[in-house]
Amino acid sequence: MAHFPKPAEGSWTQHYPELGTSTVTYEDSISPEFYELERKAIFNRTWLNVGRIEEIPRTGSYFTKELQCAGTSVVIVRGKDGEVRGFHNICRHRGNKLVWNDYPREETSGTCRQFTCKYHGWRYDLNGALNFVQQESEFFDLDKADFGLAPVQTEVWQGFIFVNLDPDNTTSVREYLGELGAGIEGYPFGEMTQVYKYRANVGSNWKLFIDAFAEFYHAPVLHARQAIGEESRKLQGYGYEALSYGIEGPHGMVSSWGGMAPPKDPSMVKPIERVLRSGLFGPWDRPDIEGLDELPEGINPARSPTWGIDSFVFFPNFMVLIWAPGWYLTYHYWPTSYNTHIFEGTLYFVPPKNATERMRQELAAVTFKEFALQDGNTLEATQSMLEARVVTQFPLSDQEILLRHLHKTARRYVADHKVTATPVGVPAAR
Amino acid sequence: MTTTLPPDFADLEPFSDWCLATEAERYAKRLASSMEEMQTFYDVAFPRLDEVLEYLDTLDLDALPDDAGRLLLLCYSLVNVSFPIEVWRQARVPDSGAASMDAVVEPAV
């Protein structure tokens, strides 16, 4: 039984005919060779979100981001002019990692006046210029102007800091994010500065975890025990249908209803949720800030009164989830090999005014972790069986349209890169 | 006996070992506790939650006295324990196996 209208073509998937409706393979998620191609074609060529401007509030504030997927580490810093800049995290002298603390492979953050290499004391200002060389006179014709830090294209969109590791990239991040990005511009992200961030090592290909969060078809089943008895059975019987889906270029979004904030029937939620008025969908009461009454037009595109959450999948590995009760969540999936990745889930709330508001946010954050632990573990089970290759063709429902699109997009980037990366005059491999 | 919580909430004193500053500590204590221990804590603390918040809401969240701050930490633990008690019937998240998830950023208060 259809609960919400679908496009004239009869389904969301057929509304985007290039997607097809056939079974799919997950070879792109179980092949070490394909992953190596993804690193070149995707992670070294697209805009990657590495953080928020609130993380570097002052001149000299910086953080590092390990990008194993792209084979580098970057340092993001706010300059004296207030501009946000990014550099490859490498000293121009002998190649030492420039900014790190105790453990070279761990990320770090802080505030500094300049960057000093631990190895031989070379110093760089916040614009990346080399301004001190230990025993400079020992070097041969060394012009410091030639040895500034290697810059990385860095742009800020709606407070989100992005880097693009392709020096030849000519597309701005705003252009890259396209209509789906433009549709959420103006949302009060900058007001939501109370942050909870969780990180997990997950034993699956990065795309498989996006798959898990890009459909809600699994929710009534996998998370059945999170709802109370009768309600859980009711949810499974009802199943799941989104309000609407959108696909544009490499990106996608799903808009969903959300009757849980507040629930129609209080007996359907946990006792502590009833007392605190909060839960998985966040605190039930919206914070009192500007910009939540009139939402940007890309949010709740179906303009449904039952709207609860929009999930945006910005290719390749960045998701933004905007919740009706006035908070947002981001997901990042950082591949570390073809079958492992680091997952980061970050919750952003308007700072609480009192202990009750603080407790509501605590409950939302803890609930998020309980769900994500279930999701993450299920993926290891999926990855291992996909790798067995005993079954290679899998059906996808209309509610899983974003998965179909994600895997297709990854394959397209890899295929396009193979074509363009073939040097002129060199015969293709036989 | 030294009291570590506001006087009105002396009945929660036996559970002051749940006043833990980080999510990692709270979650670790949950995994290390028996269901009986958590049930006892929950049965005493949960019915007081409304009164606790009514009291804490009279104070400036950014300048809580030590005893009130500890009371709030105890409430965070109550949130954590509510999952095993109200839903899972076990300390661990079901089907979470060896999976773990670390809080790498959490609010100062």
Image: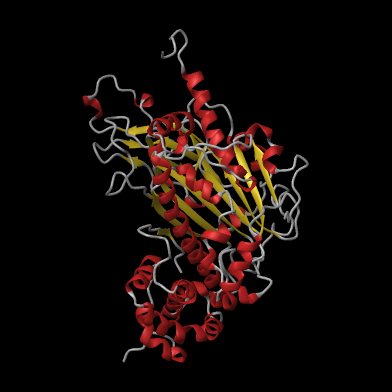
Count the labels in the image: 0
Determine the image quadrant of residue A119: top left
Placement of B28 over or under A414, stated as above or below: below
Q: Quadrant of the N terminus of chain A?
A: bottom right
Foreground residue, A394 or A422? A394
Foreground residue, A316 or B37? B37
Look at 69% across and 59% down and name the residue there.
A290
The answer to whether any part of residue A162 appears in the image is yes
Q: Quadrant of the C terminus of chain A?
A: top left
Image spot of residue B2 (x, y percent): 32, 89
**Image check: A295 left or right of A216?**
right
**Image check: A252 left or right of A358?**
right
**Image check: A355 left or right of A373?**
right
Placement of A198 over or under A430, stated as above or below: below
Image spot of residue A339 (x, y percent): 39, 42
The colour scheme used here is: secondary structure
Foreground residue, B64 or A208? A208
Look at 57% across and 75% down and name the residue there.
A276
Determine the image quadrant of residue A130: top left
Look at 53% across and 70% down and name the residue there.
A358
Determine the image quadrant of residue B90: bottom left
Image spot of residue A350 (x, y percent): 58, 62
